[in-house]
Image: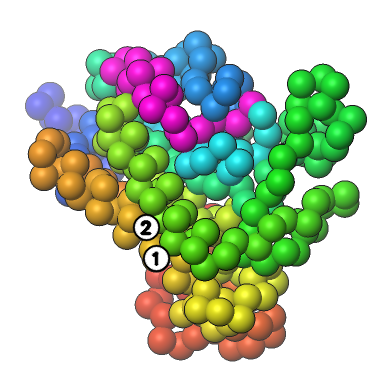
Amino acid sequence: MNDAGVHRPLLLQPISLRGIFARNRIVVSPMCQYHSQGGGPTDWHLVSLGKYAIGGAGIVFTEETAVEERGRKTHECAGIYSDGHVPAYRRITDFIRGLGAIPAIQLGHAGRKASSDLPWKDFKPLDDGDSARGLKPWTAVSSSAIPAPRAGSMTPIALSTSDIREMVGVWRDAALRSVDAGFDICEIHGAHGYLIHQFLSPLANRRNDGYGGDLQGRIRQDRSNRSGAWRAFARAAEAGPALLLWPRLRCRASLLASRPGDAVDPGLPRADRTSRQ
Ligand SMILES: Cc1cc2nc3c(=O)[nH]c(=O)nc-3n(C[C@H](O)[C@H](O)[C@H](O)COP(=O)(O)O)c2cc1C
């Protein structure tokens, strides 16, 4: 009920999430735009994200934003892997906040889905022929050296254990830049077949070290990344306003089993067993 005695549906009522106050519960989902330049946002982002804030959404997410350059799907994908990106995002977060919405960022890494052409070119894997038009292919990384199912996909390099440990720092730095850029919420993209998902999936992850095998092994890399990002956010929150970190997962029963066809780990919390996508 508002001051005028009119009932407002729950969707339009304000919500407080760990100190972050959103004017309503409408959250604009991350949506890839393929309009970044050198990873940084452009006027396109100011307009497309700004229009959702003008429209009255409570929380506005950026598209998946790569934590490192090789973690982009295409040359036009967004990233926050350089300090130089920060002021460009700050312009957008200031604009969104000024319109009463909460600016939020989704951090991600494409893993073996990297080095592709645009979606309206069917995400065709880039090859040497594309270099002539300025779209040089690059080498993708993944949990194991298994190509993505798309025809023609390159075989990625399997990250070594020391690469994985370094990656924690990469996620942490991207989270810190997100804070500097003025985002209040940071979502870790662990779904849609990207790098974290490539560790979680028994189809993509055939490692036999501590980052593969059973669910606890396959989940370890995601946990480390999240704790790296979380520590960065927690440190920033001590000094400034409240910040929120949340994961996006797509957990089908087949994903949670150790091998395709195995039973789902009964020790998992209920929420982890359901698809969230
Ligand atoms: C154009 C487009 C781009 C998307 N890009 C992302 C993305 O960057 N990250 C992500 O997690 N989901 C992405 N999604 C999925 C959406 O966030 C959302 O989950 C999906 O559209 C289902 O929600 P809906 O039923 O409201 O459309 C994208 C969806 C669309 C339509």
**Horizontal side, residue 272 vs residue 195: left or right:** left
Q: What is the span of residues highlighted in magenta in the rendered image?
A: 76-95
Mark 1 Cβ and ligand 1 under 8 Å apart: no
Q: Say left or right for 166 vs 246.
A: right
* Residue 82 covered by magenta stretch: yes
Q: At 66% across and 39% down in the image, what residue appears?
A: 73
- Residue pointed to by mark 2: 226
Write down the quadrant of residue 199 in the picture.
Answer: bottom right
Dot 2: element: helix
**Most common SS among magenta residues:** helix
Q: Tell me if residue 252 comes above or below residue 5 in the rendering.
A: below
- Tell me where residue 22 appears, x and y as whole percent: 24, 35
**Depth order, front residue of 92/59:** 92
- Cβ atoms at labels 1 and 2 below 8 Å apart: yes
Residue 192: % across, % down: 61, 53
Q: How far is disc 1 from disc 2 in space, using C-alphas?
A: 5 Å
Taking the spot 27% from the left edge, 22% from the top edge, the residue there is: 97
In the figure, residue 130 lies in which quadrant?
Answer: top right
**Label 1 sits on what residue type?**
Arg
Please report the residue visible at 52 percent of the width from the left and 68 percent of the height from the top. Answer: 161
Residue tagged 1 = 223
